[in-house]
Amino acid sequence: MSNAAELAGRIEALEIQIAHQDAAIEALNQVITSQWKQIDVLTREMTRLTDRVAAAEQSIPASPGSEPPPPHY
């Protein structure tokens, strides 16, 4: 009888441990999913900003050295 009670206690302890591990894994999964969503949003925003900077650089006139000096020089 002692062995059966000890075995039942060990099984119960393992079940409790597995339940805690399942909860921890689920919580970590939620955090990872949230972070991937945020990374995706930030990646798209960075691409958009990179495109805007490239467009702004193209709209800037050539360097001032290539323009003729103003008439008062």
Image: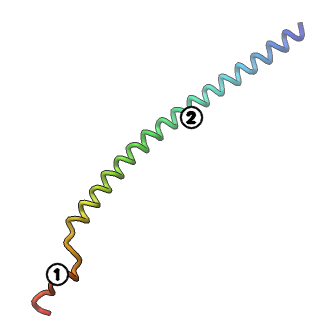
Say if 52 sits above or below 27 in the image: below
For residue 13, side relative to residue 69 (left or right): right
In the image, farthest residue toward the front? 66
Is the residue marked by circle 2 packed among few (<14), some (14-19), or many (20+) residues within 10 Å? few
The reply to whether dot 1 and dot 2 touch (C-beta < 8 Å) is no
Which residue type carries mark 2? Leu
The numbered disc on residue 67 is 1
| Residue 71 quadrant | bottom left
| Residue 52 quadrant | bottom left
List the residue tagged with mark 2: 28
For residue 15, side relative to residue 5 (left or right): left
The numbered disc on residue 6 is none
Q: Quadrant of the C terminus?
A: bottom left
Q: Residue at x 26, y 65 (%)?
A: 57
Which residue type carries mark 1? Glu
Q: Residue at x 51, y 33 (%)?
A: 30
Q: Between disc 1 and disc 2, whose residue precedes?
A: 2
